[in-house]
Amino acid sequence: MTISITICNLALGELRAPPIVDIDEHSIEARECARYYPQCLTVLLERHEWSFATKIVMLAALTLNPRSDEWAFAYGLPADLATAKRLVPPVGAMALGGSQPFIVEAGILYAQVPGAVLEYSTNIIAEAVMPAMFVDALAFALAARLAVPVRDSRESRGQLLQQAEVAAQRAIADDRNRQPQHDMPFADEVTAARLVGV
């Protein structure tokens, strides 16, 4: 995972701590940013189905299906999968009525449909695609985590946690306003436009 120096410095700025130039430099600020950034990003990504973190990919069918008595097909998962959202119809297929059932277990997706196409949230996010409100929420969350190890301030930590929550709620509301509704069937054109790697 690439750690954003910009976001780290936004978080450190909230603590009035010195900025960092490189995540590998020998400073407590850099060390603690490297320690907490991945966790803060993961927690924020798991809170909501962020539109900028959404991908669609055709899954690779596995030849061995350990649960073939319950599920007709088994598929490998993308390496960057954070959360599986829903199965969408492949390009050229008729829209499926309602959502198609599936489970994810031990790194395998099981489903009843051939040629499964999965919409999912990725856990590998470049800073360049993060909206400004998401960046703010991540910076406040990181600042809250850094308050004790960098500034030895539990009081600042509590205040920053409140600011992080407000920033996260604003970012979620903004993202919801940008997304189409997911309760409608996918049109072939939409699926084709978003399909990755096909």
Image (cartoon, rainbow, N blue to C red):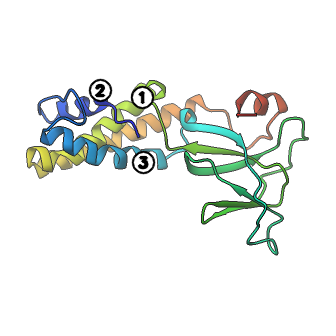
Please indicate whether residue 43 sits to the left or right of residue 12 in the image.
right
Residue 48 x %, y %: 51, 45
Residue 53 x %, y %: 54, 37
Local crowd size for mark 1, using a 10 Å CA cut-off: few (<14), some (14–19), many (≥20): some
Q: Of label 3 and label 1, which has the lower sequence position?
A: 3
Instruction: Tell me the amino acid under the disc marked 1.
Output: Glu
Q: Secondary structure at mark 1?
A: helix
When asked about the image quadrant of residue 159, the answer is: top left
Instruction: Tell me the amino acid under the disc marked 2.
Output: Thr
Q: Are marks 2 and 1 in contact (CB under 8 Å)?
A: yes
Question: Which labelled disc corresponds to residue 127?
Answer: 1
Q: Secondary structure at mark 3?
A: helix
Residue visible at 30% across and 35% down in the picture: 139
Residue 98 x %, y %: 81, 51
Local crowd size for mark 2, using a 10 Å CA cut-off: few (<14), some (14–19), many (≥20): some
Residue visible at 67% across and 33% down in the picture: 180
Q: Quadrant of the C terminus?
A: top right
Q: Secondary structure at mark 2?
A: helix
What residue is disc 2 on?
Answer: 6
* Front residue of 113 and 139: 113
Please indicate whether residue 112 sits to the left or right of residue 197 in the image.
right
CA separation, marks 3 and 1?
Answer: 14 Å
When asked about the image quadrant of residue 10, the answer is: top left
